[in-house]
Image: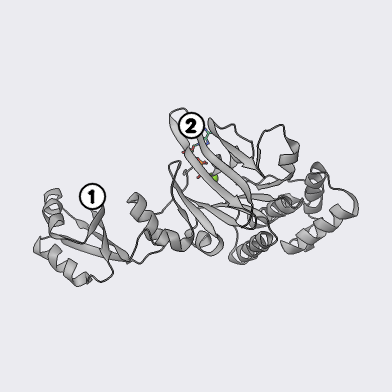
Amino acid sequence: MAETVLLVEHLYKAFDSLKAVNDVSFEVKAGEIFGLLGPNGAGKTTTINMICSLLPGDSGSVSINNMPINSQNSTLRKQMGVVPQDIALYEELNAIDNLVFWGRLYGLSGPDLKNRTTALLTKVGLLERAKEPVSRYSGGMKRRLNLAIGLLHEPDLLLLDEPTVGIDPQARHQMLDLIRETAQRGTAILYTTHYMDEAEQLCDRLAIMDHGHILAMGSLSELETLVGERRILQIGGSFMTDQIDKLLPTLSEIQLINRDQTQLTLSIPFSMAIGQILAVLQEHDLQVEHLDIKNPNLDSVFLKLTGREFKD
Ligand SMILES: Nc1ncnc2c1ncn2[C@@H]1O[C@H](COP(=O)(O)OP(=O)(O)O)[C@@H](O)[C@H]1O
Ligand SMILES: [Mg+2]
């Protein structure tokens, strides 16, 4: 069993009355890619900022390699690499000088620092442009350089906050490969994203976060079993409240997930024919304008948990 590198227990953070992080607990083991998946405003960045002591939490605890974090503890800082959501680079410096600056802060120097710098620039595909000032880089290039900085001192724990936003598909692919490779070498990775497909492809385990809460946590297949052998059916149209009230009791085996006057969201067994449901809707004079069926995936898990679609 791999060791726990990051342990987060009952973290809370409020900004005035807004509970940005509300009882968040999870762990990340060596070699594991753990995803925090949630829409904008879910509390992902606030969680990461507390883990790397950028932001004091209201309560709860964070330990890295079994040691509680403390902003004064520089050895813990060295065990952690952070790739922030807002790019943190010296624009007037080139890529090499940015890496050297951060490398020195982490106590690296000499040929070791030089070798790591070159190796990482190669891996993130920036070697050819490494001597140009960062101010000339595209958003995607800056993101790749930020990732290289996070990896420079080979931390035990890597925190990645939406590292692929604004990046082109090829660079994204390359970046995800590099993240996988980093995990294979034993690094524990915390990866936040609002891209479901990334969470599906990349993460060994993930937590679905919304309004500061973790709603569900597990491997992709564990999460998908939350929807069970069922499909999610969304029916759009214009419905009267009393029409729906009369309709629902007639639909046995069907669970109501959400309802309003323009949309009904239902969970239905796989075996149930859609035609059967449409016939019942017609009997009740419901005007159906469109229909959408979702098989179990993270989308339908989110819908099941929140009654909302995963959108930003
Ligand atoms: N410094 C702050 N002051 C006030 N509200 C904040 C601050 N930082 C974040 N928030 C709010 O906390 C919530 C969570 O934000 P954040 O952690 O950035 O979410 P995410 O990274 O998942 O998009 C949001 O509603 C956001 O507006
Ligand atoms: Mg964020």
Q: Quick one: label 1 or label 2, which is nearer the N terminus?
A: 2
Residue type marked 2: Ala
Front residue of 168 and 182: 182
* Residue type at the position of mark 1: Asp
Which residue reaches farthest front?
1
Tell me the residue at 41%/63% (across/down).
297
Q: Residue 310, image x and y in percent? A: 40, 54
Locate residue 311, reporting x and y percent.
41, 53
Determine which quarter of the picture holds residue 131: bottom right
Residue 166 appears in the rendering: no
In the image: residue 188, left or right of residue 225: right
For residue 260, the mark is 1
At which x and y percent is residue 289? 22, 63
Crowd rating for badge 2 (residues with CA inside 10 Å; few <14, some 14–19, many 20+): some
Query: Between tags 1 and 2, which lies in front?
Result: 2
Q: Which residue is depicted at the point 90% across and 51% down?
A: 110
Q: Is residue 126 left or right of residue 190?
A: right
Disc 2 target residue: 14
